[in-house]
Image (cartoon, rainbow, N blue to C red):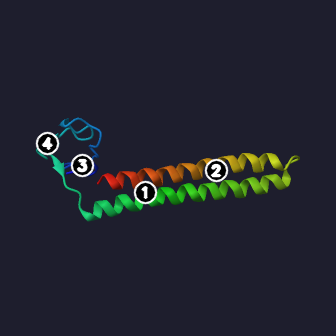
Amino acid sequence: MTTRSMICAKCGYDLRGLPQRGGCPECGSTYNKDTLNGIASLNSAYRRSENISFWLKIAALILSALMIMGCAGILSYFAKTPSKPLVTGGFMCCMLLLIAIAMIVLKKMDDKED
């Protein structure tokens, strides 16, 4: 079993990054990654919901970037120096898009490990 599919059998808490044996930080039930006691196997519904939530986060980042640029464009219409809101909005937009790209790259790298 890979580290990607380590969730608590009782509450569904993600146990990745925790010691091989111990108690779940969420519910306190014991788990052992070596013997898989207290570890639930991921079903396809969980994987689908995890994938959907990831892409919803990416969509939210992209929509936020577009909204920021739209607001910057409107503000530049009323500003004494129209370039200031556009530069600031452009910078914020680029940062959000870079975060989205980094998240996608990290997900692809994590999927290759599985």
N-terminal-most mark, 4 or 1 = 4
N-terminal-most mark, 2 or 1 = 1
N-terminal-most mark, 4 or 3 = 3
- For the residue marked with disc 4, what is the amino acid? Asp
The CA span between labels 4 and 2 is 43 Å
The CA span between labels 1 and 3 is 17 Å
- For the residue marked with disc 2, what is the amino acid? Cys
Picture disc at residue 11: none
What is the x, y in percent for residue 1? 19, 51
Which of the two discs, 2 and 1, sits closer to the camera?
2
Picture disc at residue 34: 4
Picture disc at residue 54: 1
The CA span between labels 4 and 3 is 13 Å
Q: Hey, which residue is sitting farthest right in the picture?
A: 80
N-terminal-most mark, 3 or 2 = 3
> Is 102 drawn above or below residue 55 in the view shown?
above
- For the residue marked with disc 1, what is the amino acid? Phe
Which of the two discs, 3 and 2, sits closer to the camera?
2
What is the x, y in percent for residue 55? 45, 60
- Would you say 57 lies left or right of 2 here? right
Q: Residues within 10 Å of mark 1 (few under 14, many from 20)?
A: some
Disc 3 target residue: 7
Frontmost residue, 112 versus 80: 112
Q: Residues within 10 Å of mark 2 (few under 14, many from 20)?
A: some
Q: Residue at x 52, y 53 (%)?
A: 101
Disc 2 target residue: 94
When asked about the image quadrant of residue 41, the answer is bottom left
Tag 2 secondary structure = helix
Frontmost residue, 100 versus 113: 113
What is the x, y in percent for residue 70? 71, 58
